[in-house]
Amino acid sequence: MKKNTKIYVAGHRGLVGSAIMRKLKKEGYNNLVYRTSSELDLRRQEKVEEFFKEEKPEYVILAAAKVGGIQANDTYSAEFLYDNLMIESNVIEAAYQNDVKKLLFLGSSCIYPKFADQPMKEDYLLSGKLESTNEGYAVAKITGIKLCEHYNKQYDTNFISAMPTNLYGPNDNFDLETSHVLPALIRKFHEAKINNEAEVVIWGTGKPRREFLHVDDLADALLFLMNNYKGDQFVNVGVGKDISILELAELIKDIVGFEGEIVNDLSKPDGTPRKLLDVTRLNDLGWEAQISLEEGIKDTYQWFKENY
Ligand SMILES: NC(=O)C1=CN([C@@H]2O[C@H](COP(=O)(O)OP(=O)(O)OC[C@H]3O[C@@H](n4cnc5c(N)ncnc54)[C@H](OP(=O)(O)O)[C@@H]3O)[C@@H](O)[C@H]2O)C=CC1
Ligand SMILES: C[C@H]1O[C@H](OP(=O)(O)OP(=O)(O)OC[C@H]2O[C@@H](n3cnc4c(=O)[nH]c(N)nc43)[C@H](O)[C@@H]2O)[C@@H](O)[C@@H](O)C1=O
């Protein structure tokens, strides 16, 4: 992509979209197009068609989606399925109709079967049953991958897909009902510390294992893929290492400086037992993550204290 090329970043205010904006600006890209969801609701096909006709973006990074943690996915499963199907179908079709040179679609590691072998290779897609707490979201994300594949096959487009692992960083969602685990624990330990509380409650058994990637590393990987990758095969984006939720809680507890106990709320779901991506394909293309989990949590905690 040239520095003055017109790039549409869908979802520019979100965790991922805002990191992509920071990265693109830092690298000197100076022709960025974006809209908030109230300016352009991507679930509305006609509005999306009008926007693409008017703006004619050359490149599209699709980071707009209905996103949330385990509880939000489970509670609002119809919205997670419907919104994501509509957003991705409308944007991908409009990109094709308007001769977009390249589009990047973002999926998620939850596309893989609940009991997939670990680490999960791209080939494991559609090889088993999905985790029930995020089935709607996962089905929508799998459809997004397939839309890119089939548009490439039938229309010779250049649409690529990246599957990030669990993400965190500045501009994350810290709402305790709808957030992912890492921002939730930063907030819980911080509030428990300042209120001198005796304990922090974590959901489930603490035994599930997850892999966490700092969103600035993700943005770097996505720009790398936009500039260096073409193909129908989607690409996992992760660090290749995982950690149990209890270990994560202990790490955040230490970073925040909370001295009380960690207790489990067993009425909450554990979800998938383990989600660790095989990142060989991305590493072989020449990219690997740089930000350690400890460094990334410290950076995110600092951001939380300054902004939240
Ligand atoms: N967070 C994570 O751990 C992971 C995220 N991903 C994927 O990364 C992508 C970005 O996620 P993330 O940044 O975390 O999500 P956020 O919730 O932080 O941001 C999503 C963005 O999407 C926009 N959006 C939502 N609905 C609509 C709509 N109907 N019309 C237009 N825009 C809309 C929002 O815009 P506005 O602010 O204007 O309302 C928001 O800025 C998603 O595809 C997600 O599936 C993948 C793996 C893990
Ligand atoms: C990115 C990914 O994110 C989701 O899947 P998930 O990985 O299960 O998400 P999560 O971060 O919410 O939970 C991870 C683990 O952590 C435990 N946990 C402990 N304490 C808290 C807690 O306080 N909040 C939350 N949210 N979880 C907690 C929780 O019980 C679970 O065992 C899907 O949306 C999926 O669709 C998706 O793409």
Image (spheres, helix red, strand yellow):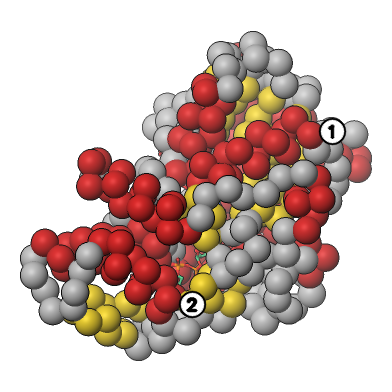
Instruction: Name the residue beneath numbered marker 1.
Output: 157
Look at label 1 and name its amino acid: Thr
In x, y percent, where is residue 161? 72, 46
For the point 27% across and 84% down, the residue is 263
Q: Nearer the viewer, residue 32 or 278?
A: 278
Q: Element at badge 2?
A: strand
On the rendered structure, is 158 left or right of 55? right
Instruction: Name the residue beneath numbered marker 2.
Output: 244
Q: Quadrant of the N terminus?
A: top right
Count numbered badges in the picture. 2
Q: Quadrant of residue 267?
A: bottom left
Task: Look at the picture and state if 153 lies above or below 3.
Answer: below
Look at label 2 and name its amino acid: Ser
Viewer can see residue 111: no
Spatial CA distance of label 1 from label 2 is: 40 Å
In x, y percent, where is residue 118? 70, 76
In x, y percent, where is residue 292? 51, 55
Ligand 2 picture quarter: bottom left
For the point 91% across and 40% down, the residue is 154
